[in-house]
Amino acid sequence: MSEIVVGDDGLSRPVWASVDPMLRDYYDTEWGMPVRDERGVFERLSLEAFQSGLSWATILRKRPAFREAFADFSPEAVAEFGDDDHERLMADAGIVRNRAKILATIQNARATLELRDDPDGDLAAYVWSFQPTDTPRPKTYADVPTTSPESLALSKGLKRKGFAFVGPTTMYALMEALGIVDTHLLDSHRRGTSGVWPA
């Protein structure tokens, strides 16, 4: 069975992005497009951590609720969250109510603020500094890596800077989402559209 499906619009997409309108729109317009602002990177880092062990579709459906619950992922606002906010979040059925992940998001917001004074740059600049010199060119999903030397280095670097839930697999998924690597299949209409990597 082919891993690429040609839609009614004539565009080639992977099977996972070919049926559900929400996933299709996310694939067509967001996934792998460059995100270089601090808030945007913090949001995606947070959502990738919540996604760990779950499907991305689950997180994407809950994203509006996550944004409302976490003050639109403003690092300044989330860094100020206290015990009352933590209990509020644990009672919010609209998000993933995982205590460790909620606490990690608050911790990561505080670490994001501290990173602003870091010589390595703010969160966005720091994450992008791990862009590799080349990107995968997968024909099938079996060709897509789940980690890389750069995602391992990013994971270790963020942990040293006080971040949590930033394992190398999660960081590789983040790098894919932000456009730092391009893992669109070669036959996909999205291959090379980010402007970061050639097709």
Image (tube, rainbow, N blue to C red):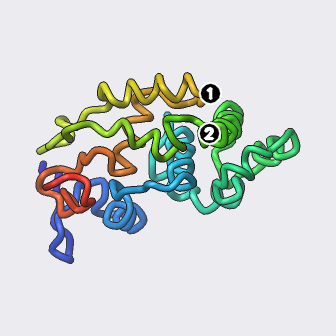
Residue 83 image position (x, y, % from top left): 86, 39
Q: Residue at x 50, y 56 (%)?
A: 37
Residue 173 shown left or right of residue 89 in the figure? left
Amino acid at the residue labelled 2: Asp
| Of marks 2 and 1, the one in the foreground | 2
Q: Residue at x 36, y 56 (%)?
A: 34
Q: CA distance from mark 2 to mark 1?
A: 14 Å
Depth check, front residue: 49 or 129: 129
Q: How many marks?
A: 2
Depth check, front residue: 16 or 160: 160
Residue 185 image position (x, y, % from top left): 18, 50
Q: Residue at x 54, y 38 (%)?
A: 49
Question: Can you tell which mark lies on residue 91?
Answer: none
Q: Residue at x 33, y 29 (%)?
A: 150
Mark 2, residues whose alpha carbon is within 10 Å: few (<14), some, or many (≥20)? Answer: few
Q: Secondary structure under badge 1? A: loop
Question: Can you tell which mark lies on residue 117?
Answer: 2
* Residue under numbered circle 1: 162
Residue farthest bottom in this picture: 9
